[in-house]
Amino acid sequence: MGRITFLISILIFVASSVAADEPRYRTQFASPNGKYEASLKDDRSWHLIEKSTGKELYSFPDYYRDGIWFSSMTLVIGDDGMHAVAVNDYGQNYGEQTYTRNPDVLFFFRGGKLLRTVKLFDIAVPKFMEFSVSHFRWLYSADRLAIRDSKIEFTTFDLNHFIFSVETGEQIGKGVDGIFPQGAVFVSGAVRSLGKHRYEIAVQCVVRGAATKGARLIFESDKIGWVGGGFNETLVLQNGRLVARKGIIFNNCD
């Protein structure tokens, strides 16, 4: 039964990976306060307008270089309308943009002019990224990205929390995401049930904390359960209990 469950899990992951590999294409983004909107027009340029008046403040091309289009990214518009950050959180993993070439993943704009870019390896470690057939991912919760107090903050898959100034595009802070408590471990591997609320994870990848690859960690979980075994999971554990289930596949960790 455990083997069948494992095979089903693999098939579901492969199917979801293929579906997730479809090109992403966005044509409209708005500032959190709703005052400004950036739209991709037929001239293949982004045009930012003040919604209340319809006045266009500026525009910039959708194409960057080396096959990069901002329409495949998350475009974060500031409440002042002047600052924007394009985040390449679902990068193409082929051609000039393969992750091994250390592509640009953050693009800071002011008034439609590109101020600065930040490369992938400045903020993410390939070992702790997620790969599908033709894309790579490194960022948590792109849907919650926002510019606040002239700053943009985000967390990478290995729980590093970054703060950048949108005024300069410079990094101004870095720490560990608050979900990671002192003394915890962040590991990935195959989980199997040991009975009611009791489980074991065979550690394949250690992301954070004092754990060892190949170790078998026993933990308890009341809210999330697994039946059988062979489930590939990424978990934060502390004092023999489940803290968080992160839902990442670190398929480049070895």
Image: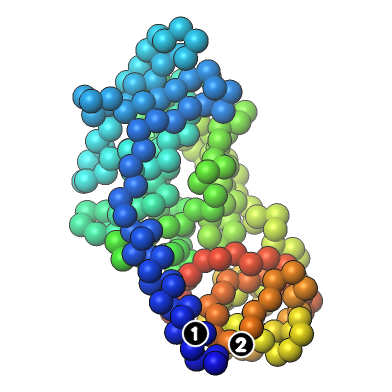
* Residue drawn at the location 39% of the way across and 46% of the way down: 88
Contact flag, marks 2 and 1 (Cβ < 8 Å): yes
Q: Is residue 150 positioned above or below 94 on the image?
A: above
**Circle 2 residue:** 228
* Residue drawn at the location 38% of the way across and 42% of the way down: 73
Residue 206 placement (x, y as % from top left): 57, 76
Along the viewing direction, whichever of 242 and 149 lies nearer the viewer: 242
The quarter of the picture where residue 244 lies is: bottom right
* Residue drawn at the location 41% of the way across and 77% of the way down: 11
**Circle 1 residue:** 6
Q: Mark 1 Cα within 10 Å, few/some/many (few <14, many 20+)?
A: some
**Horizontal side of residue 192 vs 38, given as left or right:** right
**Horizontal side of residue 62 vs 116, given as left or right:** left
Residue 128 placement (x, y as % from top left): 48, 66
Q: Is residue 170 positioned above or below 60 on the image?
A: below
The amino acid marked with disc number 1 is: Phe
Q: Is residue 203 positioned above or below 247 on the image?
A: below
The amino acid marked with disc number 2 is: Gly
User: Visible in this render: residue 130?
Assistant: yes
Residue 46 placement (x, y as % from top left): 32, 26
**Horizontal side of residue 112 vs 248, given as left or right:** left
The quarter of the picture where residue 238 lies is: bottom right
User: Visible in this render: residue 200?
Assistant: no
**Where does the C terminus fall, quadrant-wise?**
bottom left
Label 2 and label 1: CA atoms lie apart by: 9 Å
